[in-house]
Image: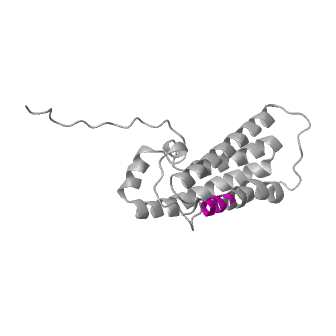
Amino acid sequence: MKPFWLLLKNLLYLLVVPGVIAGWLPLRVFERRPRWPATWGWAEWTGIGLALAGAAVFLHSVWVLARRGQGTPAFFDPPRKFTKRGPYRWVRNPMYCALFALVAGEALFFRSWHIAVYWVCLVCVLHLLVVLHEERELRFRHGAVYEDYKREVPRWLPRKPRPVLQTVPPFGPRG
């Protein structure tokens, strides 16, 4: 795939998906008049930190899928290669986790119960999407490789990657 076309598709994805899920929906539909906080306390600083961490993980995950997987995160244009690098070594769904962090950060920053309820709904809907559709699709496309990946890497809560086991030949050199 041509690098320019791949870059353009990923940029479009970045504008649409997190723009709608973490931007437009929580700030225009659920919290119609978000107010910038007059003073910043622990909730605002924690919210900013969560949102920045979520944005960084999301961008890095898209980069890994484009660079290593040669595709986009969009379900209609999935990566051509199975990807188990970067944040995908720590958790199977780093982009969804990043969206959860972004929306939770907004809820904390604006101290909004409306956005917090939206966050709960988002977590439930995306969990069902992953369990009922995405995992089945990945198992169909990648087979045993994906089954091994599922056993090694958790779905939602990041965990430090386990070291790769090196196999040794059962017998020494003959001679």
Q: Position of residue 132 (x, y in %)?
A: 51, 62
Residue at x 73%, y 37% (from the top left corner): 49
Quarter the N terminus occupies: bottom right
Residue at the far left in the pictured view: 175
Quarter the C terminus occupies: top left
Main secondary structure of the magenta stretch: helix
- Answer left or right for 66 relative to 104: left
Q: Is residue 35 above or below residue 168?
A: below
| Visual colour scheme | one colour
- Answer left or right for 75 relative to 107: left
User: Which quadrant would residue 55 be assigned to in this image?
Assistant: top right
In the image, 138 versus 41, the foreground residue is 138
In the image, 103 versus 164, the foreground residue is 164
In the image, 63 versus 124, the foreground residue is 63
Q: Position of residue 165 (x, y in %)?
A: 34, 37
Q: Position of residue 79 (x, y in %)?
A: 52, 60
Q: Position of residue 174 (x, y in %)?
A: 9, 33
Q: Is residue 9 magenta?
A: yes
In the image, 34 versus 3, the foreground residue is 3
Residue at x 74%, y 59% (from the top left corner): 20
Residue span colored magenta: 4-11
Q: Is residue 10 magenta?
A: yes
Residue at the far bottom in the pictured view: 76
Residue at x 55%, y 60% (from the top left corner): 71
- Answer left or right for 165 relative to 62: left
